[in-house]
């Protein structure tokens, strides 16, 4: 009976163990589920931490053989670095980009591994091309910013931190390197440092060298503005314009300043070497300083100076007639020809002056009180002079500026008719006085042309001095020009 009772009691005992096993299984399942949730939570935290804290703020957007272009999402700037990132050649800050907006750049030229393209909607477009290396010792990147509307002022600033920069234009206080200079952004054109001491002088080159082995060359067609913030930035830019001209420049990098200069310097086209008339170097030039208000006084002063030179046995020389005296002779020629019955000037009129070696001085400026200016207005030739653009309700008006203390207008060298008129006046004056030498003055930039540069970007690209030099070339090989460029 006892055994039977034990047998009968065993099924009940097994039944009581089954719920315990089930509870144990459910506990293990719950623990595993909690552990999985914890791991998922930790992984989420890790990913977020990597994205926010550990992930670098820079992206490689273009790579060469030993250098690359890096985009910094935090500062919205580009930098050129070595591939192992042990050297930063230069950092470029883009002042025209909005502070907020696109931080991750999308390459629209992904199909071309040597090119990068991106856009900021409504502001600007960027295109960077890695030029073929060939047998070069430097890698070059061609950068082009294109504005999307006419109110965008493009400006790229190169950092001076740990970089010594050289090149650019001459200044009144010259610095070498240029890091210590401090000059406001202004047109990169030749100017007279006496009239505009804060401008750039006659030595001008769109070429900058950095001590880290970087070189920047701005393309010639760009209406360049250059500014320097002392020990901080070298800025290259273009002001807003209706033409929406792109900012184009080439940046080259190499292992040293010397090697990159050898590479980039060879890209700059050299001027044709042609010697001028060297006979001019055999004579001293004497400047007639005495002011005169009539032609007779000019003649008297010239004869007096010539006699003094002979008296002191200073040899054969050339007397340089200033612009004011030249204009007096020019004005007398017009007044004599305008006299009724006069068709030519008598040969004996300037006989005494023809016996002297003279150099006449001309400039593209013409006084508003002169007969030449009044005649061009009477003949409807207002376009001979630099003018503000015409509006719907007005015609072009010559731009008034100051020259030698007087109000004047400046010759429009983009007009072929105006250049022919100027050349004809100069040749007639040369024939009249049998003068061999001519001096051209006043080809520099002027602060008074800044108003024009906002309306016509061609003037701000230093085109005027180039055309002025070509005009001097047309006047002959004995022409002296007081302004110079490459």
Image (cartoon, grey):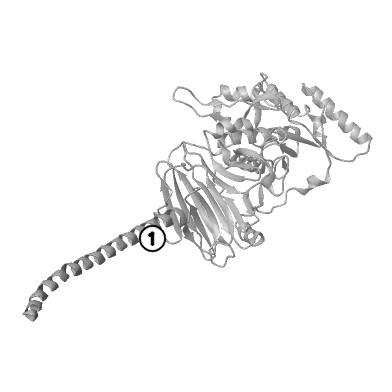
Q: Which of 175 and 288 is in front in this view?
A: 175
Is residue 486 shown to the viewer in this render? no
In the displayed image of the protein, which residue is found farthest to the right?
312
Q: Residue at x 11, y 76 (%)?
A: 10
Q: Quadrant of residue 425?
A: top right
Q: Quadrant of the N terminus?
A: bottom left
Please indicate whether residue 46 sits to the left or right of residue 199 in the image.
Answer: left
Residue 351 in picture, x, y percent from top left: 80, 30
Q: Residue furthest bottom?
A: 3
| Res 456 seen here | yes
- Residue at 67% across / 47% down in the picture? 179
Give residue 31's position: percent from left, percent from top.
28, 64
Residue of label 1: 111
Which residue is pictured at 57% across the width and 23% down the height? 377
Q: In this view, does 289 lie above or below 175?
A: above
Q: Position of residue 334 (x, y in %)?
A: 68, 24
> Can you give x and y, in whole percent of width and height, for residue 142 in the image?
51, 54
């Amino acid at each position: 009976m006892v055994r039977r009772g034990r047998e009968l009691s065993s099924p009940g005992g097994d039944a009581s163990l089954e719920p315990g096993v089930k509870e144990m299984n459910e506990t293990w399942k719950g623990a595993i589920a909690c552990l999985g949730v914890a791991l998922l939570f930790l992984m989420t935290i890790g990913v977020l931490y990597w994205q926010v804290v550990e992930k670098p703020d820079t992206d490689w957007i273009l790579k060469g053989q030993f250098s690359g272009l890096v985009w910094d999402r935090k500062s919205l700037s580009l930098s050129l670095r070595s591939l192992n990132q042990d050297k930063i050649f230069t950092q470029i800050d883009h002042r025209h980009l909005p502070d907020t907006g696109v931080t991750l750049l999308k390459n629209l030229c992904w199909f071309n591994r040597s090119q990068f393209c991106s856009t900021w909607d409504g502001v600007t477009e960027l295109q960077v091309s890695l030029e073929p290396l060939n047998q070069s010792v430097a890698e070059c990147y061609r950068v082009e910013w294109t504005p999307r509307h006419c109110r965008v002022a493009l400006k790229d600033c190169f950092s001076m931190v740990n970089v010594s920069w050289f090149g650019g234009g001459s200044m009144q206080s010259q610095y070498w390197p240029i890091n210590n200079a401090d000059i406001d952004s202004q047109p990169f054109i030749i100017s007279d440092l006496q009239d505009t001491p804060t401008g750039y002088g006659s030595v001008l080159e769109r070429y900058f060298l950095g001590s880290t082995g970087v070189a920047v060359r701005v393309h010639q067609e760009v209406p360049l503005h250059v500014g320097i913030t002392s020990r901080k930035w070298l800025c290259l830019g273009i002001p807003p314009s209706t033409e929406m001209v792109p900012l184009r420049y080439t940046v080259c990098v190499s292992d040293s300043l010397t090697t990159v200069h050898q590479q980039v310097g060879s890209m700059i086209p050299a001027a044709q070497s042609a010697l001028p008339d060297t006979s001019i170097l055999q004579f001293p030039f004497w400047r007639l300083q005495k002011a005169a208000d009539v032609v007779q006084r000019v003649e008297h002063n010239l004869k007096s100076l010539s006699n003094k030179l002979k008296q002191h046995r200073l040899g054969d020389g050339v007397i340089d007639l200033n612009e004011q005296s030249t204009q007096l002779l020019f004005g007398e020629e017009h007044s004599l020809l305008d006299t009724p019955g006069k068709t030519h000037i008598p040969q004996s009129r300037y006989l005494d002056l023809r016996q002297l070696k003279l150099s006449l001085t001309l400039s593209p400026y013409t006084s508003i009180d002169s007969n030449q200016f009044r005649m061009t207005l009477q003949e409807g030739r207002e376009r001979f002079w630099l003018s503000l653009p015409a509006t719907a309700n007005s015609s072009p008006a010559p731009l008034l500026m100051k020259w030698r203390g007087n109000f004047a207008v400046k010759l429009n060298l983009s007009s072929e008719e105006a250049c022919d008129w100027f050349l004809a006046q100069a040749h007639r004056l040369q024939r009249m006085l049998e003068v061999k030498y001519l001096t051209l003055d006043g080809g520099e930039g002027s602060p008074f042309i800044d108003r024009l540069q906002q309306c016509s970007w061609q003037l701000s690209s230093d085109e005027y001095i180039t055309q002025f030099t070509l005009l001097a070339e047309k006047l002959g090989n004995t022409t002296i020009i007081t302004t110079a460029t490459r």
